[in-house]
Amino acid sequence: MKKVLISLALALALVAAVAVPAMAAPVEKTASVTVTEVISFTVTDAGATGINFGSLNQGTADNPEAAQNGAGAVTLAVAAETNVDCNVQIKASGDFSDGATHTIALSNAHWDTDNAVAGYTPMTTTYATIGTSTHGVAYSQDVWHWLTIPSGQHAGDYTSTYYYQAIPQ
């Protein structure tokens, strides 16, 4: 009986040794992901499409954009879904031109983040930062525009192009 018990114990030990799963050495792998940049930026025009100063007389200073009445000519907004901090910027294409030989210097055009003429900034052909937004937080800024028409300015329809953008900081 002793031999049977020893054989039985040995058999159980063998079964137990075979039944234990073999453990593999852990393997380390780096996991990576790139989250794409999202900038949700809108420009809302307060009036008729475009920055419209209307019909103005020569020799008049600081004429407001026609639709800015208590609010800016445009509202610039960066949505909360934007996942980078942004600089919100403005510039113009150049002098106002009638398409012929007459121009109004771009330095006669101005912008500001409030409706007070005092402290406004001249428009330029390089981007100027209006404000900054923080990722994940909605940002909104009204922008006001003014234009001075020099004395003796030739009569005509003049245009320039204004640009607005939100770029990563």
Image (tube, grey):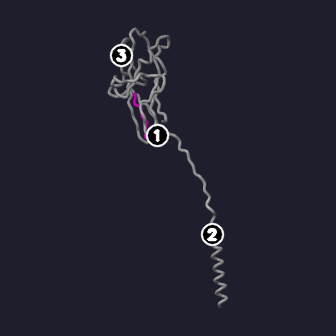
Label 3 sits on what residue type? Ala
Label 2 sits on what residue type? Pro
For numbered disc 3, what is the local secondary structure?
Answer: strand
Marks 3 and 2 sit apart, C-alpha to C-alpha, by 88 Å
Which circle marks residue 21 in the picture? Answer: 2
For numbered disc 1, what is the local secondary structure?
Answer: loop
Q: Where is residue 18 in the image (x, y as percent from the top left)?
A: 65, 74
CB under 8 Å between discs 1 and 3: no
The vertical placement of 165 against 61, above or below, is below
For numbered disc 2, what is the local secondary structure?
Answer: loop
Marks 1 and 3 sit apart, C-alpha to C-alpha, by 39 Å
Q: Where is residue 160 in the image (x, y as percent from the top left)?
A: 46, 19
N-term-proximal mark, 2 vs 1: 2
The vertical placement of 137 against 32, above or below, is above
Circle 1 residues within 10 Å: few <14, some 14–19, many ≥20 = many
Q: What stretch is highlighted in magenta?
A: 74-84
* Figure label count: 3
Circle 2 residues within 10 Å: few <14, some 14–19, many ≥20 = few
Query: Which of 130/70 is in front?
Result: 130
Query: Which of 46/136 is in front?
Result: 136
Marks 2 and 1 sit apart, C-alpha to C-alpha, by 50 Å
Q: Position of residue 153 (x, y in %)?
A: 41, 10
Label 1 sits on what residue type? Thr
Residue at mark 3? 61
N-term-proximal mark, 3 vs 2: 2
Circle 3 residues within 10 Å: few <14, some 14–19, many ≥20 = some
139 part of magenta stretch: no
User: Where does the N terminus fall, quadrant-wise?
Assistant: bottom right
CB under 8 Å between discs 2 and 1: no
